[in-house]
Image: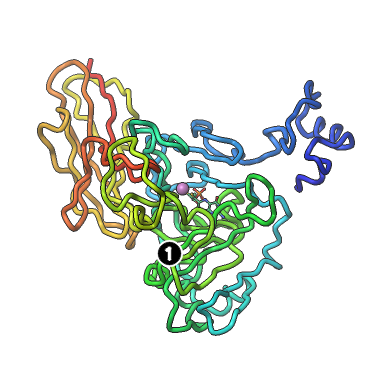
Amino acid sequence: MKSSDFHNRRGFLKKSALTALTSMVGSEMVFAKKLPPHYLPLPLENALEGKHPDLMTLSDKPWVVETPAHLLDDDVTPFEKMFIRNNGLVPEEKIDPKTWTLIIKGESVEAPKTYTLADLKAKFKPYTYQLVLECGGNGRSGYVPQTAGNQWGDGGVSCAEWTGVRLKDILADVGLKNDAVYIGYYGKDLHPSRDPGKSAISRGVPLQKALEDETLIAWAMNGQEIPLQHGFPLRLVVGGWPASVSGKWLHTISVRNKEHDGAKMDGHSYRMPRSPVQPGEKLPETPENFKVIESMPVKSLITFPKSGIVTDLNKTLLLRGQAWAGDLAVKEVHVSIDFGATWQKCMLNLPKNRLSWQRWTAAINLPQKGYYEVWARATDEKGTTQPMVIPTWNPGGYLNNSCHRIAVKVV
Ligand SMILES: Nc1nc2c(c(=O)[nH]1)N[C@H]1C(S)=C(S)[C@@H](COP(=O)(O)O)O[C@H]1N2
Ligand SMILES: [Mo]
């Protein structure tokens, strides 16, 4: 369905579209004439179709939708519980996977090369990995003073199973020049301004990360076609780094001889100050002051029970959660019921594969009736532990990996 089927050149609903929309919505659209330019009735925007009703919409133009922590309890995140983060507007043209192509170009390829989806499937060996995609801004709402950007709670993270071919196999087939150091992606989504000359986001990773076994050009998620909101029909998937490097609706990869300079690679976008700043401090947004975020830090969630649970005295409470640590594995997870004064070690599963999250479980006994908080704290394989308090404030509000807490009442 195309916006131009319904909107005139100035973006307002066409008179001819009104009857069609009315019948699609199922009743008269009382204030249809007042619908702002480029808006469609929500049921036709489709973003939340099939999504769990308890996901939280942070924004609808573009769509930004968060998953509450207790819905991240599956080992493999299903589509209906997967967060959405769009920087622009989902492609409006009808997507035909048969004619979709991936172009590999840029100053550091021997010669540009184009693949159809069928070429990718026929030419290269497919792999399937479970990969953590966490928005760089996940947890942003914890920072004081508040920073600009979507005010994520804890749920801008997923770990689905992605199937595709290794980017490194494709790049080897294309042939790279010696000066190749970075790759950047381009997707078919529209800039929010609808200016076709602008891209909503075009990020990338150093060549070294691009060449890892788990870096995929994926056409399937959880064994099915990638859902439209998550990048149908083709997506770059790079686990462990800010999910903004996992380009949806992928049509081009550019191999660069310098740090990629696409949209949202500059300023303080997905960048951290090179040295800590005072909360609220304004820092000139130069590359000298800000460096691109690479691996995400160690983090965990309590996915069961849901915060606010009421339980009985003398009943052992079983806890479950997920833990991940960017490029690293998680070594240990601990929980505390006394605001971090003492910690109890949890059971921790091995990851299904590198860059997957890891299930942790614990059984706790709460000594008397009253209010408790359960805190969870993961430690990565290098010994780095999550902070209990909000970590260093930064202008973009990124990388808040403070301990997740839930409230528990014993009666
Ligand atoms: N083409 C394109 N790719 C994109 C984005 C986007 O807006 N356009 N958003 C990025 C960001 S910031 C995040 S956090 C993830 C979100 O992935 P999801 O919506 O599938 O959960 O996609 C990334 N890939
Ligand atoms: Mo993101």
Could you say which is closer to the camera, residue 397 or residue 284? Answer: 284
Left or right, residue 360 beside residue 383: right
Q: Is residue 353 above or below residue 207?
A: above
Of residue 357 and residue 299, the one placed in the foreground of this image is 299
Mark 1 crowdedness (10 Å alpha carbons): few <14, some 14-19, many ≥20 = many
Above or below, 119 relative to 298: below
* Image quadrant assignment for residue 404: top left
Q: Which quadrant of the view contains residue 333?
A: top left
Task: Determine which residue is flagged by label 1.
Answer: 205
Specify the amino acid type for callout 1.
Answer: Val
Residue at 71% x, 35% y is 39
Residue, x 50% and y 65% (percent of image)? 184
Give the side of residue 305 with respect to residue 105, left or right.
left
User: What secondary structure is marked by label 1?
Assistant: strand
Using the rendered image of the protein, determine whether residue 240 is visible from the camera's viewpoint: no
Q: Where is residue 25 in the image (x, y as percent from the top left)?
A: 75, 31
Question: Whole-percent x and y of residue 19?
Answer: 86, 32
Front-most of 224 and 381? 381
Q: How is the image coloured?
A: rainbow
Q: Which residue appears at 82% of the width and 45% of the height?
A: 5
Q: With respect to residue 321, does 221 lie above or below?
A: below
Is disc 1's CB within 8 Å of ligand 1?
Answer: no
Q: Can residue 250 be seen in this view?
A: yes
Image: 199 above or below 310: below
The mark total stands at 1
Q: Residue furthest front?
A: 284
Measuring from the top left, give residue 57's x and y in whole percent: 53, 33
